[in-house]
């Protein structure tokens, strides 16, 4: 596999690379990002390796991320056509203005025009809701997004960081009203963040949404920098720059130990193993990588050449399994009550003990 082993994103015709170049690190405005020069080199390196999917947002590094991308590709028509440019709105890039945050029509249109200007393009390939707005009626948001697509300024839409029930509500409304539906779901997903498997991942599989995980290395915890020897005390990292001071838990250390062991077997890095794991989970189309240097980018791209065995995937799954939510804990009991010991689709659970002596028509 390579960055040119493209995948279809959700229920659409949009082809994207299996690793997406995230750009929250483009620009030093937040105190821990990459310089303009290094960001430019990362974009060029990613493209040279065959990557075609770049993700940004209106607020990243105080709007600077979009500007950096625009300066690199905005005036290059051939490169612009080649790339899938995704950006987000909803978070407020103009503090103090109540109508430049959220997903209302006024906010959406204003932020769209600003993003188009900074990216130096006439359209956004994939426009994400960055986080769910519980104040704006869902019908206003979906109608406004549909109008943006019909205007030609947006090609596809997606949603990030939202409850499964809200995404399902919005998606169903779009289908019923013949509005543009979502094709992508952006969520935090990693060996250290698997609670999304309770509701969000199954919802995406049912609703035609390609999953694009963010935080696949959990802010660097799974990058290989952290281990038993330093127990979370590493200088010069993004976590350290944000004032992070912590000790790794026993579960985190067990996962990191296994990543190091498997990485040695594959002659690669723990980061590449962690990325390969998440990229091979059901529903995942393209994993977003956030890097601050060309070296980190090259190390992460190596993940596309890693082929984890079934046993390696299963072991990492076992080590990282989170506590079950109510429904996921209860769902194993449901077939014993519903099937009554009957084989259906090749699955034959034992009948629940309380049903063992049931007789039709007894009463």
Image (cartoon, rainbow, N blue to C red):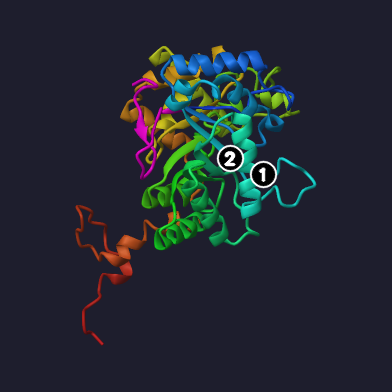
User: In the image, which disc is placed on residue 157?
Assistant: none
Residue at the spot 48% in from the left edge and 23% down from the top edge: 77
Say which quadrant the N terminus sits in: top left
251 drawn magenta = no
The quadrant holding residue 8 is: top left
Element under disc 1: loop
Q: Main secondary structure of the magenta part?
A: loop
75 lies above or below 89 = above
Q: Mark 1, residues whose alpha carbon is within 10 Å: few (<14), some, or many (≥20)?
A: many
State the count of labels.
2
Q: Nearer the viewer, residue 67 or 211?
A: 67
**Measured from the top left, where is residue 347 in percent x and y?**
23, 53
Q: In the current view of this chain or complex, which residue is farthest to the right?
A: 96
**Measured from the top left, where is residue 46 in percent x and y?**
48, 18
The quadrant holding residue 239 is: top right
Element under disc 2: strand
Residue at the spot 66% in from the left edge and 17% down from the top edge: 36
271 lies above or below 158 = above
**Measured from the top left, where is residue 211 in percent x and y?**
44, 40
Mark 1 and mark 2 residues within 8 Å of each other at the beta carbon: yes
Q: Nearer the viewer, residue 266 or 71?
A: 71
Q: Is residue 156 visible?
A: yes
**223 sits to left or right of 98:** left
12 drawn magenta = yes
Task: Please give the range of residues in magenta.
Answer: 1-19
- The residue beneath circle 2 is 88
Q: Mark 2, residues whose alpha carbon is within 10 Å: few (<14), some, or many (≥20)?
A: many
**Measured from the top left, where is residue 174 in percent x and y?**
44, 58
Say which quadrant the C terminus sits in: bottom left
Q: Nearer the viewer, residue 134 or 304?
A: 134
- The residue beneath circle 1 is 91
């Amino acid at each position: 596999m390579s960055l040119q082993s493209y995948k279809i994103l959700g229920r659409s015709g949009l082809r994207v690379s299996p690793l997406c170049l995230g750009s929250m690190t483009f620009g030093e405005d937040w105190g821990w990002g990459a310089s303009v020069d290094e960001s430019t080199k990362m974009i060029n390196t990613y493209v040279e390796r065959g990557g075609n999917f770049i993700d940004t947002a209106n607020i990243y590094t105080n709007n600077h991320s979009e500007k950096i991308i625009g300066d690199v590709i905005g005036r290059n028509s051939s490169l612009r056509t080649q790339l899938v440019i995704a950006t987000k709105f909803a978070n407020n890039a103009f503090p103090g203005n109540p109508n430049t945050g959220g997903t209302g029509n006024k906010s959406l249109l204003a932020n769209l025009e600003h993003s188009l200007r900074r990216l130096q393009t006439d359209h956004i390939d994939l426009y994400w809701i960055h986080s769910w707005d519980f104040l704006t009626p869902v019908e206003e948001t979906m109608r406004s997004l549909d109008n943006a697509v019909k205007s030609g300024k947006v090609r596809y839409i997606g949603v990030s960081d939202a409850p499964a029930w809200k995404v399902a509500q919005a998606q169903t409304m779009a289908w019923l009203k013949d509005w543009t539906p979502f094709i992508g779901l952006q969520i935090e997903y990693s060996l250290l963040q698997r609670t999304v498997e309770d509701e969000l991942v199954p919802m995406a599989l049912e609703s035609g949404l390609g999953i694009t995980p963010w935080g696949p290395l959990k802010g660097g915890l799974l990058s290989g920098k952290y281990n038993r020897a330093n127990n979370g005390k590493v200088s010069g990292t993004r976590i350290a720059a944000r004032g992070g001071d912590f000790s790794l838990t026993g579960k985190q250390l067990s996962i990191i130990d296994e990543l190091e062991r498997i990485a040695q077997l594959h002659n690669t890095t723990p980061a590449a193993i962690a990325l390969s794991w998440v990229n091979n989970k059901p529903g995942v189309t393209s994993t977003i990588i956030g890097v601050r240097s060309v070296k980190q980018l090259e190390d992460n791209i190596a993940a596309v050449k890693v082929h984890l065995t079934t046993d390696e995937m299963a072991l990492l799954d076992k080590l990282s399994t989170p506590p079950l939510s109510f429904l996921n804990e209860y769902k194993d009991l449901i077939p014993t009550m519903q099937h009554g010991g009957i084989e259906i689709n090749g699955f034959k659970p034992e009948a629940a003990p309380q049903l063992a002596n049931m007789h039709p028509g007894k009463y």
